[in-house]
Amino acid sequence: MLNTLTIWNFALLEQVQIDFDKGLNILTGETGAGKSILIDALGAMLGNRLSTDFIRTGADWLRVEAIFSLDNQPRVVAYLNENAIDTTEGELIITRQITSNGRGTILVNGCHTTVAVLKKLGTLLVDIHGQNENLALLNVSNQYKLVDGSDDRIKGALTAYQQAFKSFKDKEQQLAEKEKSSADNEQKLEMLKWQVQEIEAAQLQDNEDEELEREIKKLSNAEKISNYIGEACRNLYGGSSNGIGVVSALEEVVENLRDLSRFDDSLDNVTDTIKEACIQIKEAAYEVRDYGDELEFNPQLLDKLQSRMDVIDKLRKKYGATIEDIMAFKEKAQQQLNDIENYDDDISALKQEIEKAREEATACAARLTELRKQAGDRLSMAIEEHLHELGMPDARLEIAINEAEELGSLGADELEILFSANPGQDMRPIQKVASGGELSRIALSIKAVTAFRDDSPASMIFDEIDTGIGGRTAQMVAERIAMVAADKQVLCITHLPQIACMADVHLYINKQVVNGMTSTSVRALTEGERVNEIARMASGVDVSAASLDNAREMLANAGVKKQQYSRKLG
């Protein structure tokens, strides 16, 4: 819901802050006071074009700021989160500014964003209805939303159909891909066979390459290893340049300390420690000696291992960095080989699956069509009834659900809204026969029927929807706008007292000249001021006692009507 709109240096508006509320917010004022400028300013908040032409004379910049409540607006919150815009405060602040040099900025909750993002956000925040905006009625997707949103059963049936339709189309895509690849199958078959055979012939073992690399490294350096072992043994057992080995030296130390203990036992613990170390070193020395005894340089074995390693390296260059990668490649190639060899069987099975999926989707589509026809009939009758009340007693409207030739993303039917305004005229598509004024009344009738349950934005604008009407028709338009306002926040610019008296918030737009400069102000009217404004709208400039009494009566009657609509929704 729109809470506040603040405007600086926008055309006639120098600085204006307007506080809106839930329900029906009416804007009235003298012709030329700037009512349409407010709609232009709000349109800038919703992604409409903003140029330097709007900057107030004598100013270097303009700015518009709107504050929306995010309560009960999950689609808006989801879209903001998708664009990494913070929503934790529970409100949305949009600021848009442009300078005289044409430089513009857009901030959404403090984040810089683009016009494209703002335009999409605008469609989720506010629904505008005017002579031009009613063209949205002609959009086929909006017509489907009208019908599908009127019955929860349709939503469930549509979800079931779209799942079945996706399965059907996915299988068709699989068939197309298989048939497209069939031309290359012969050549690919030979290649896959050769690859699988080459890998199988190698008879690879898990981690074989790592073990081979260790053995080759050992045999290739056998001479160096032998030298290191010989020197280690000499150091351990003697025979080195100093003539005594580590083991012998430690044994001698132990004997000396034992002899010492006969005179002083304070080093007994040290003796035990050195003795244990001597034992461990002797065991290690045995292992070194045994390793040296078993060491043998075998040129034939080295050649054999290197030849085996060459085979593995060749495979690694072709199929993967490790034996695990090579085996994974082989499994994939084997699967492709099986697919090609079983091509005919797979195609036959896939065609059967496609036919079954088509039948399932067709059955879901038939259920969806039937529900849409029922909903279309109910909506047609309800909308037509409102049209009769809106000064079109001979109007006929039908939401026709026709059978489509093919299954589509929305079902197996085509939706069309047919309309006839006058007796004796055939019903034809609304885009061909309905005038702008008729489209406005059709839109209002639709909203009167669906506003309480559709998922349209929480705020709506009716921009001079009263053009060219009066009398009883004006009263009927007023009542239907009030019906919509019982569930949605509605902003309405009007010249008709019948509509203005339905306001929950009545805003008066006043134009004045100060020091040779024209400016426009906006303020909420008190109850007494509302009576005067309704009287002025009904009788003109000369407000008499009778016109004031009439205005009070209109306001009282409007209050009764609004209570009725509230009770119906409750």
Image: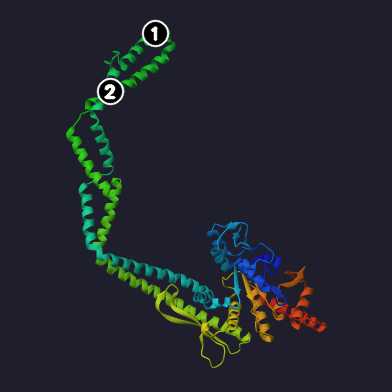
Comparing 278 with 310, the one in front is 310
Residue name at image x 78 percent, y 79 percent? 552
Figure colour scheme: rainbow
Quadrant containing the N terminus in the rendered view: bottom right
- Residue 215 position (above or below residue 117): above
Residue name at image x 56 percent, y 92 percent? 423
Left/right placement of residue 72 relative to residue 344 reads: right
How would you rate the neighbour count of disc 1 (Cα within 10 Å): few for under 14, some for 14-19, many for 20 or more? some
Comparing 423 with 369, the one in front is 423
Q: Residue furthest top?
A: 263
Left/right placement of residue 35 relative to residue 543 reads: left
Disc ID at residue 286: 2
- Residue 80 position (above or below residue 489): above
Hey, what amino acid is under mark 2?
Tyr
- Residue 370 position (above or below residue 304): below
Residue name at image x 44 percent, y 79 percent? 413
Q: Residue furthest bottom?
A: 424
Residue 390 sits in quarter: bottom right
How would you rate the neighbour count of disc 2 (Cα within 10 Å): few for under 14, some for 14-19, many for 20 or more? some
Hey, what amino acid is under mark 1?
Leu
Left/right placement of residue 165 relative to residue 2 reads: left
Residue 494 sits in quarter: bottom right
**Residue 97 in sight from this viewpoint:** no
Label 1, on which residue? 260
